[in-house]
Amino acid sequence: PFVVTENCIKCKHTDCVEVCPVDCFHEGPNFLVIDPDECIDCTLCEPECPVNAIYPEDDVPAGQEGFVALNAELARSWPVLTVRKDPPADAAEWDGKPDKLKLLER
Ligand code: SF4
Ligand code: F3S
C-alpha cells in the first residue's frame, strides 16, 4: 500500500482524497492516513500531494519507517475523508519542517 508520511502533518492539503478510487484516506485533526487494507496501489494519490508526503510502503524516506504502522493504526479509528477541504491557513509555513511527528494530534 501507499503511506502518508511526516510532511503531511500540519500541511494536510487533502488533494489526495479526491483521486482515491477506493476511498481509503482517513482524517485526523492535522494529518491524514491511508488504510493499508483498502489501498489497491493505484498510485494516483502520490503526485497529487503538493508537499510530496505520499510514498509506497517500501520506499518511505529514511527514518520514517514508523509511518507504515502509524497509518494502519490511525486508519482504524479516524473517519474516511473523500472530499477535499481547505488546508490550514499556515500550511505553507509547515512544508518541509523537521520533527513534525511530535505535533501529530490524535
Ligand atoms: Fe488510494 Fe490509490 Fe493512493 Fe492507494 S495508491 S491510497 S488506492 S489513490
Ligand atoms: Fe496530506 Fe498531501 Fe494529502 S499534505 S492530506 S498527503 S495531499
Image: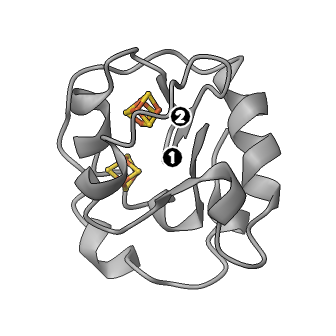
Rendered-image quadrant of the N terminus = top right
- Compared across the picture, whether 44 is left or right of 65 comes to left
Ligand 1's image quarter is top left
Q: Element type at marker 1?
A: loop
Describe residue 10's horizontal placement relative to residue 99 as left or right: left
Where residue 62 appears, as percent x and y from the top left, is 73, 79
Q: What is the x, y in percent for residue 14? A: 29, 42
Label 2 CB sits under 8 Å from any ligand 2 atom: no
Mark 1 vs ligand 2: CB under 8 Å? yes
Mark 1: which amino acid? Phe
Position of residue 55 in the picture relative to residue 42 (left or right): right
Instruction: Name the foreground residue: 38 vs 90.
Output: 38
Q: Which mark is residue 31?
A: 1
Mark 1–mark 2 Cα distance, whole angstroms, equals 5 Å
Question: To which quarter of the image does residue 43 belong?
Answer: top left
Residue at position x 75%, y 47% from top?
Answer: 68
Where does residue 37 sit, x and y in percent of width and height?
Answer: 67, 19
Establish if 24 lies above or below 1. above
For the residue pair 47 and 32, the one nearer the viewer reads as: 47
